[in-house]
Amino acid sequence: MCNCTLNTTVVVDSVFVGTVRNSGSLGCHIGTRMILRLMTVGVGGFAGAICRYLLSTWVQRASGWNTFPLGTVVVNLLGCLLIGLLGGLVITKELFSPAARLFLLTGLLGGFTTFSTFGYETLMLLRDANYGAACMNVGIQLVAGLIAVFFGIKLATIL
């Protein structure tokens, strides 16, 4: 059991991330740095999930299209555009600090859509000429993902 308590204000890259102190009585297996990283990702994920909900419901209502998940498509495509833009700035300009990358790419866009991560990672595999891994990633994510959803629904009907 991790025995960490929260009581010291911590700011990373001018963004309040939380408060952390290691109580030390039983020892904390998760270090302060890891706690800060987790909090950074968590705050970004929280914001990303809210943005996903607001945008997808707005797009869905505005479109009036009840038979197709247009809101999800828009969120996924926007997420791919944003992770490409921000990831590209990291690659070409080394623009963001590690903490900002955790917040923006892993947290915010991860909470906004994991499809953006899938798109980015697949494109990086293609960029590195790792075509087999890129095809395997696409196949596993899409085909196995659909199969997993199917079995999840079947399992839900059994329970």
Image (spheres, rainbow, N blue to C red):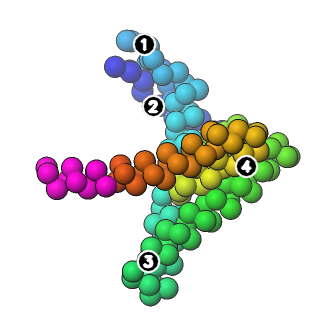
Q: Nearer the viewer, mark 4 or mark 1?
A: 4
* Label drawn at residue 87: 4
N-terminal of the pair, mark 2 or mark 1, is 2
Cβ atoms under marks 3 and 4 closer than 8 Å: no
How far separated are the C-alphas under marks 3 and 4? 30 Å
Q: Secondary structure at mark 3?
A: loop
Q: Amino acid at mark 1?
A: Gly
Q: Secondary structure at mark 4?
A: helix
User: Badge 1: few (under 14), some or many (20 or more) residues near its Cα, within 10 Å?
Assistant: few
The outermost residue toward the right is 93
Query: Please, is residue 57 above or below residue 92 in the view?
Result: below
How far separated are the C-alphas under marks 4 and 2? 32 Å
Cβ atoms under marks 4 and 1 closer than 8 Å: no
Provide the residue designation for mark 3: 68
Q: Which residue appears at 56% of the width and 33% of the height?
A: 36
Q: Secondary structure at mark 1?
A: loop
